[in-house]
Image: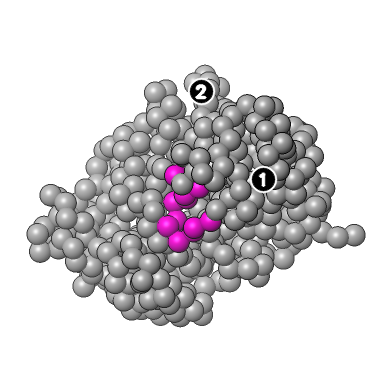
Amino acid sequence: MDAQSLSRFRETFTGEVIIPGSERYESARRVWNGMIDRRPAIIARCADGAAVARAIAFAREQALPIAVRGGAHNVAGNATIDGGIVIDLSGMKSIAVDATARRAVAAPGLTWGEFDSATAVHGLATTGGLVSTTGIAGFTLGGGIGWLMRAHGLTCDNVLSAEMITADGMTLTASEAQHADLFWALRGGGGNFGIVTRFAYRLYPVSTVIGGLTLHPASQARDALRFFRDLTASAPDELTTLFAFLTAPPAPFVPAELQGKPAVAIVACYAGDASDGEAAVQPIKRFDPAGVDLIGPMPYTALQSMLDASAPAGCMNYWKSSYLDQLTDAAIDTIVEHAAAMGAPLAQVHVHHMGGAVARVPPDATAFAHRSSAYAVNIVATWIDRADDARYVAWARAFSDALQPHANGGVYVNFLGEEGEARVRAAYGDRTYARLRRVKAQYDPENVFRMNQNIAPATA
């Protein structure tokens, strides 16, 4: 960029322009995953949709590659870019809740903590992230696995409409009635098609849930995971559960002999009638009477932020993920064996129970694929010292390789790092991927928005 072009951009841009050397540049370029260390040429922190359109136009005039930043929580680090422009939506935080219609219209800079706080005032919620600092935009566009998914579907299943700005600066509203092909693609297809500046979500009456976790020593991992398999085989739709391998925190509620030691947890959220919920979680509470039991009535917002400390910003992160159709004894043995070698205190392994409302949506209704998968396994390598990069990346890869004979070949796109086109295709399957390429060709034929889990436009 020459100084004159940059000056003209500043004059016509309704937001903050941050360039190398600016006081806020170093903090503005950082993303959640500490492994990502990129230096954009310009960060355009947008105030509204008009600013987004202007930033896109400027990027194209200057032939600058574009990255789009919402919450910047994605493990792949696609919210920043070397030598290009970051179109930063993090300041766009408006939300309007219509309690009567059970509807929220939200801007893309919100985190789930901010979104949930606004809807909780009305006793309402929709499926959101497992960590409250996650941004709503990328999470929604990739699908949205969260605590309410078995009761109310994925986040993308609860999008009523989306306002999007295209590569050529057009503002479109996608819904079942308008641009239906784009609406289909935005619900699971990621940020491939444009920049969403407003989402409308369906809300549900959710305030207090039966939630929390039980914690057990890692010596019980195999028995606990088999119990989890049996529990999930007959769990009601209102109950969403997660099995986690972790290091027990040095917290007052954890026995001294378990603090800082390998452990397993069963995390639960029952979103429904309280008395039915108490009955549904009793098997979890009875599994190990000597274990730590923190399951009970709590505000949904408390459950949403309960795991925040396990995902601090700035740590090194490398993830590998797969879907499983079943938890066989052999799969359980593989998971337990490799989880025991994770080492880093912040590393975890998550086994998400899918099904319920997620599986009842027809497979071609949205771009989110693999709805029939029973479990999503996420190998979360998290550590602090860059000197340990090779060690923990190798652990995650070896674990993932060993799990493949038990997996169904699919992967959740929001858990993907930089793994190449084949894994992006695996997130959708051939049929959905081909349809996404056709939609991409219609709305972004030049692949302007390619700093993502990219789907190249179809060619004639």
**Earlier-in-chain disc, 1 versus 2:** 2
**Mark 2 closeness class: few <14, some 14–19, many ≥20 residues within 10 Å:** many
| Residue 36 covered by magenta stretch | yes
Quadrant of the image for the C terminus? bottom right
Q: Is residue 151 toward the left or the right of residue 243 in the image?
A: right
Going by the image, does 332 lie left or right of 441?
left
| Residue 76 lies in the magenta-colored region | no
Q: Position of residue 393 (x, y in %)?
A: 43, 72
Give the CA distance from mark 1 to mark 2: 22 Å
Which residue is rendered at x = 74% and y = 32% of the image? 171
**Could you tell me which quadrant the N terminus lies in?**
top right
Task: Give the label on residue 186, or none.
Answer: 1
User: Is 419 in front, or is 179?
Assistant: 419
Q: Residue furthest front?
A: 3
Residues drawn in magenta: 27-38
Examine the residues drawn in magenta and state their main secondary structure.
loop
Considering every residue shown, the one lying at the far left of the view is 256
Residue 260 is situated, as x and y percent measured from the top left of the image, at: 18, 63
Residue at horizontal 67 percent and vertical 58 percent from the top: 454
Name the disc covering residue 59, or none: none
Pointer 2 residue: 97
Q: Position of residue 413 (x, y in %)?
A: 57, 58
Amino acid type, callout 1: Leu
Residue 19 lies, in percent from the top left, at 56, 42
Give SS at disc 1: helix
Image check: 285 left or right of 422?
A: left
Tell me if residue 52 can be seen. Answer: yes
Q: Element under label 2?
A: strand
Question: Which residue occupies 50% across, 40% down?
Answer: 22
